[in-house]
Image (cartoon, grey):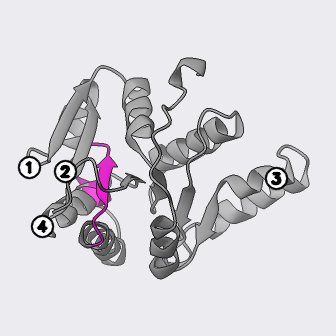
Amino acid sequence: MMTMSMSKTVCVYCGSSSRVDDKFKQMAQDVGAALAKAGYRVVYGGGQVGLMGLVASSALDAGGEVVGIIPDHLDEREQRHEGLTELHVVSSMHERKAMMAERADIFLILPGGLGTMDEFFEIVTWRQLGLHNKPIIVYNFDGYWENLKLLLNTICAEGFMKPEHQKHYRILDTFTDIMSDIEGTVPTTERFKEELI
């Protein structure tokens, strides 16, 4: 296992629902295991339910390090994962998001619901505003995020986003491409500029 100071940290955003097709559950397990086997640390929302729990458990089972950050008001709903390398219980969603962003070298968005979309749009907006310069990758597993691609293209076409801001994120269809992107990312020592939010 790589030490905490050596490996890149991938912040994973994904769904907390377990009421999804088994293909999504298998995808989450595959992603968690692949990240750990490649020597990447995972930081995520700290729960053990839904895809987020599967990513964490699979990464741990594969010998990886997983850092969870969960707000105390979601502790019952998302059921904190007790087997993590680190678990931080914080007081608010804002503190959770800022702490996850601070620790990340790369952001990886898997299929999810409104919470995942909130996290994606916020981290892209923070990059647009210059609060960080970290890669943002969306895993378009089985075409799940096709409508998101359409929405983002429409936002740009109608003038609500500059074309150059579309370069702040990549929407990729295969996990092979995602791993190549992560491999090419240099770990950052730059502090996340949360004070500007």
Circle 2 — which element?
A: loop
Residue 84 drawn above or below residue 175: above
Residue at figure coordinates x 32%, y 47% from the top left: 44
Q: Is residue 129 above or below residue 170?
A: above
> Which numbered circle lies on residue 14?
none
Mark 2 near mark 4, Cβ–Cβ under 8 Å? no
Residue matched to label 3:
164
Q: In which quadrant of the rendered image does the N terminus lie?
A: bottom left
The residue pinned by badge 4 equals: 61
- Alpha carbon distance from label 3 to label 2: 37 Å
Q: Amino acid at mark 1?
A: Gly
Residue at the left extreme, as displayed = 83
Number of other residues with Cα within 10 Å of mark 2, as a class: few under 14, some 14 to 19, many 20 or more: many
Horizontal arrangement in the rendering, residue 141 relative to residue 34 (left or right)? right
Along the line of sight, the residue nearer the viewer: 56 or 78: 56
Q: Earlier in the sequence, mark 1 or mark 2?
A: 2
Q: CA distance from mark 2 to mark 4?
A: 14 Å
Evaluate if marks 3 and 2 touch, with contact meaning CB atoms under 8 Å apart.
no
The crowding category of the residue bearing disc 4, from other C-alpha atoms within 10 Å (few below 14, some 14 to 19, many at least 20), is some
Q: Three-letter amino acid code at disc 2?
A: Gln
Residue 86, quarter of the rendered image: top left
Q: Nearer the viewer, mark 1 or mark 2?
A: 1
Q: Label 4 is placed on what type of residue?
A: Asp
Q: Position of residue 84 (x, y in %)?
A: 14, 48
- Of circles 3 and 2, the one toward us is 3
Residue 48's tag is 2
- Which residue lies at the image location 37% right of the left edge and 55% below the top edge? 8
Q: Nearer the viewer, mark 1 or mark 3?
A: 3
Pointer 1 or 3: first along the chain: 1
